[in-house]
Amino acid sequence: MKYTAIAMLTCGLLTAGCRLLSTGTHAHAMKEAVDECRSRADVGAIVTSVTNWVAQYRASSEFKIERDGTNTYIRGTVGIFPSLFSKYDIIVELDSERQEAYCYGYLPTKVPDGRRNAVVEFLFRAECAYGLSPATLVLEEDGSVRCQSWLPFGELQGTPGKAIPQLVGSVMEKLYACSTAIGPVLLGLETPRCASCIHPVGLFNGEYESSPDTLAADTDKVLKKCFSDNEWTTERSPSGWIPKYLASADSTAAFIKAWISDVKRDVGGIYDRIDYTLVVSRGMVGNVCPLPIAIPKDRIVAVADAVMRLNQSSKCALFCVDFDNRKLWCGYSFPVSALCNCDEAASNRYRVFIKAVAPFEVARNSERLSRIAKGED
């Protein structure tokens, strides 16, 4: 089933006629109809672009297109790749109400209950070894291993040739990168530490021309769009675990340190101030917001399991645990261009999101995670 802009506009015009007859509020109904037409046309164009790009990796039958309210789903299987798990089920979700797209990819296996803790540790170690990426690995309650990413609609509309590999390709890339290593961990033949061998392979997620000039320009855009006060500093060669995790050897990154005050009063949780770092690298800006606690060695498994269960229900802001440094943080990211290329309302929304979403998740879960770290929950 294929959606075209013409078909959607026709459907929208019929909807407009029904509303005009039933409500009598001509101007309001027409505005709603026009908005709906635009939304459906936008989704139709994205569906076409995504299915055309994914077709080169299609493993079997045509991708299926399904609609459910304001959401459209593209479902199919990609493969065959030279790895232990050579095919992945892919779902692309287009949320026209939020104007956001999500991609989920699944390994064709289930994790037995007795191997859950080992695989949770493996997936978090794989995240740390892999470094900064639009995609994140998650273990679901039923044992499914998924990888997910998200992008604003504006990216898929403005630069689909770059955005679709970033949305879908980053998921395929990370699944491929970890698929061979996870097998022995599932069977108990390897420890989770084998994830240290995982690294980007650069097969599906396109290329981004990174240079000191593009990095400086991206950093300047983030600063101008996101900050109007003095609550930030920038660093090019900082020390500590954040640069170690996020700045791979072959890329450059800039780090913007900032904070939010009065968090306990405005949001809740146990902290009055929450510090975070915006990382600008390879066209992306990501918020890395740590929970300011040291996780005891004997509690890290319990904390990792708790945050993985939180990740299961999240689409964009996800937690990660560094088992070596016993650090816990929440991350949230999107392309720098989302701050500049969207309409004003969307740009303002993302400007707030990149500063606040990760700190809000840390604040919201700070009390419970602190209790788990102390062994009190």
Image (cartoon, helix red, strand yellow):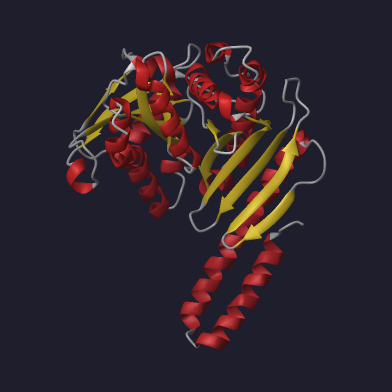
The image shows residue 326, relative to residue 277, as above or below, that is above
Residue 7 in percent (x, y) is at 71, 66
Q: Is residue 165 left or right of residue 343?
A: right
Residue 200 in percent (x, y) is at 58, 19
- The residue closer to the viewer here, 58 or 114, is 114
The image shows residue 98, relative to residue 310, as above or below, that is below
Q: Is residue 269 left or right of residue 93?
A: left
Residue at 71% of width from left, 39% of height from top? 53
The image shows residue 345, relative to residue 172, as above or below, that is below
- The residue closer to the viewer here, 189 or 239, is 189
Q: Is residue 329 left or right of residue 234?
A: right
Query: Is residue 287 at all visible to an observer of this figure?
Result: no
- The residue closer to the viewer here, 243 or 252, is 243
Residue 11 in percent (x, y) is at 66, 71
Residue at 31% of width from left, 12% of height from top? 239
If the image is split into quadrants, where does the N terminus sit? bottom right
When asked about the image quadrant of residue 240, the answer is top left
Count of numbered circles in the view = 0
Residue 213 in percent (x, y) is at 43, 22
If the image is split into quadrants, where does the C terminus sit? top left
Query: Is residue 237 at all visible to an observer of this figure?
Result: yes
Residue at 52% of width from left, 77% of height from top? 30
When asked about the image quadrant of residue 279, the answer is top left
